[in-house]
Image: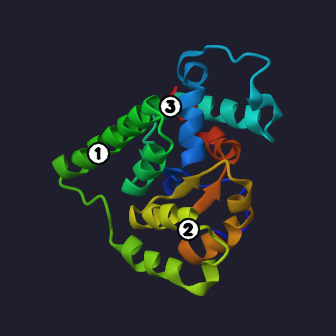
Amino acid sequence: MSTQWPESIPYDEFPWRLFLDSSTLQYLQEYGEYIYNGGSIRPSNRLYSVPFGEENVEALRLIMAVGARAPLQLVLSGNSIEEVAARGRHVYLQWAFEIVDYWESILQTYEADGVEAFSGKGSFLARDIASGCFGYLSNKDARLLKDAVLLECDAFITMDLKLTKNAKHIQSKLGILIVEPRRYWSLLRPWAALFH
């Protein structure tokens, strides 16, 4: 994959394994009624004052609709769960465990089919995160990014604009796409009709 922002990605190279950072996971939980069930969002909701907030929630709705039929894999890690637990919100933690259960069921499918879920390249690449060239990452972001690389995720879905500003550098070093949901949807949209 090029380190420039791709206009499109061929189907056989498409990033299907997605690591969800806590901001994305929180949006999925907070706006789940809209994203999964077509509910409404109150006009007074703070979402409308967040840069690209409405656009990202709409993108999540479209991604999840396609993901119901596409080979989309949503991934969380132990560090993800620790972050969610630190928020002290039971419903949010329960939602995170549902995503973990979903991810574990995908791994069981690989095992049942006699296919390796991981090639081993993630372990090699994850060592680079400790190097000085990623000093701009917060400890939290570095832990989650390392998890995403270890779990051989193709993309890291985030609402964190600071993280997306470093997307090209991260992709050039680690081969993982760092994108907001709206950007991921722009890549998925050309393939969406295959899954209706």
- Residue 62 lies in what quarter of the image? top right
The residue that appears at 74% across and 31% down in the rendered structure is 47
Amino acid type at mark 2: Asn
* Mark nearer the N terminus (1 vs 2): 1
Which residue is the extreme one toward the bottom?
132
Nearer to us in this view, 57 or 92: 92
Q: Is residue 28 left or right of residue 54?
A: left
Image x and y of residue 101, in percent: 31, 39
Residue that carries the numbered disc 2 in the rendered image: 139
What SS does tag 1 mark?
helix
Please provide percent x and percent y for residue 24.
58, 43
Residue wearing tag 1 = 104
- Tell me the crowding category of disc 3: few under 14, some 14 to 19, or many 20 or more residues within 10 angstroms, Cα based: few
Residue at (49, 50) in percent of width and height: 18
Q: Which mark is residue 195?
A: 3
Residue 92 at x, y percent in the picture: 47, 34
Q: Look at the numbered disc 2 and give the secondary structure of its residue.
A: helix
Question: Label 2 neighbourhood size at 10 Å, few (<14), some (14-19), many (20+)?
Answer: few
- How does the figure colour the protein chain or chains? rainbow
| Camera-side mark, 2 or 3 | 2
